[in-house]
Image (cartoon, helix red, strand yellow):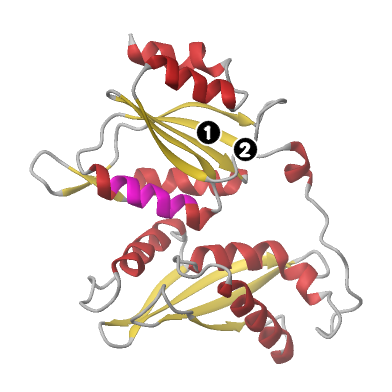
Amino acid sequence: MAGPEEGLAAPAQEELEALAAIFCGPGEWEVLSRSGTQGAMCRVLTKAEGPSGADTPLELVFHLPAGYPACLPGVSVSSERLTRAQCAAVRDKLLEQAQGFLPEPMVHQLVVWVQQNLRHLLAAPGSGAGPGTCPAASATEAEGPWMTLLHLDHMRAKTRYVRTVRQWASALGLTGRLMFMGRVILLLLQGHRDRVKEYLVLQKTSKVDVDSSGKKCRERMASVLWEARAPPGHARFLAFEVKELSSLDELRKEFETAGLEALFPECVLGLVK
């Protein structure tokens, strides 16, 4: 992938790097063009469940203008299993969804949205695929969100690192807490299990920090302390927040407030002794 170009906003540059790490399968991702004046054009090859229940291949091309993400991306949709009218309907719906994501980077959120909603969209009146239906909650959603607790060993470039974590969480639709207490750094993520897994891929493969010489480097010392379906009594996080805590008691209260008090002695106390 070509290097960043002057004129392409930093959030857009960072998003392209993140997308390359997420869509890392053969042929899944390609940057078609990039310039400081015209922005960037990228292609995502993915699949989504169609009306019949079978996987429908999708080619999604996004044009990110030089002003993106303060302005909407251009979108085109094609598929060998969809009619031209259906592709146009999907594109129009993606652009409608994009309005709600401004002014944040949104390509991954749009891909996830079409993966989750293609079947219902094509079954809607006017799409040529039969009568409309109401999307039902999946069994996974009904059982509760997936949660993961990570220990981050250190952050040399803290401002950049925190900004990147926020951006990834937003792009993947994750909520949770990034907590600092002395030298202890804990990241508690909540969301769809597949999205949490994608975050872990980003954490391990992207250059989120700098080494002792100031060069960008990957996070090699992050460790998963705990992961499971959200336990009964857990108060779901409504947003992703960064917490600067001054004492062990404040850190304990964060876990208690979230209904995760059992995790504190099991996973956290050993880090501060």
Residue 73 vs 167, above or below: the answer is: below
Locate the N terminus by quadrant: bottom left
Residue at 50% x, 44% y: name it.
Answer: 240
- Between the residue at mark 2 and the residue at mark 1, the CA separation in whole angstroms equals 7 Å
Q: Quadrant of the C terminus?
A: top left
Q: Pointers 2 and 1 in contact (CB under 8 A)? A: yes
Is 250 placed above or below 24 here?
A: above
* SS majority, magenta: helix
* Residue 224 locus on image (x, y percent): 45, 29
Q: Quadrant of residue 187?
A: top left
Q: Give SS at disc 1.
A: strand
Residue 212 location, quadrant: top left
Q: Is residue 206 left or right of residue 196?
A: left
Q: Is residue 103 left or right of residue 233?
A: left
Residue 50 shows in this picture? no
Count neighbours of disc 2 (C-alpha within 10 A) and say few if under 14, some if 14 to 19, many if 20 or more.
Answer: many
Q: Which residues are magenta?
A: 161-169
Residue in view at x 38 percent, y 44 percent: 203
Q: Pointer 2: what residue? A: 146
Residue 148 shows which numbered tag?
1
Residue type at tag 1 = Thr
Badge 2 amino acid: Trp
Residue 244 placed where, x, y %?
A: 36, 32
Return the x and y of residue 92 as percentages of the image width and height.
65, 83
Residue 154 is drawn in which quadrant?
top left
Q: Is residue 262 visible?
A: yes
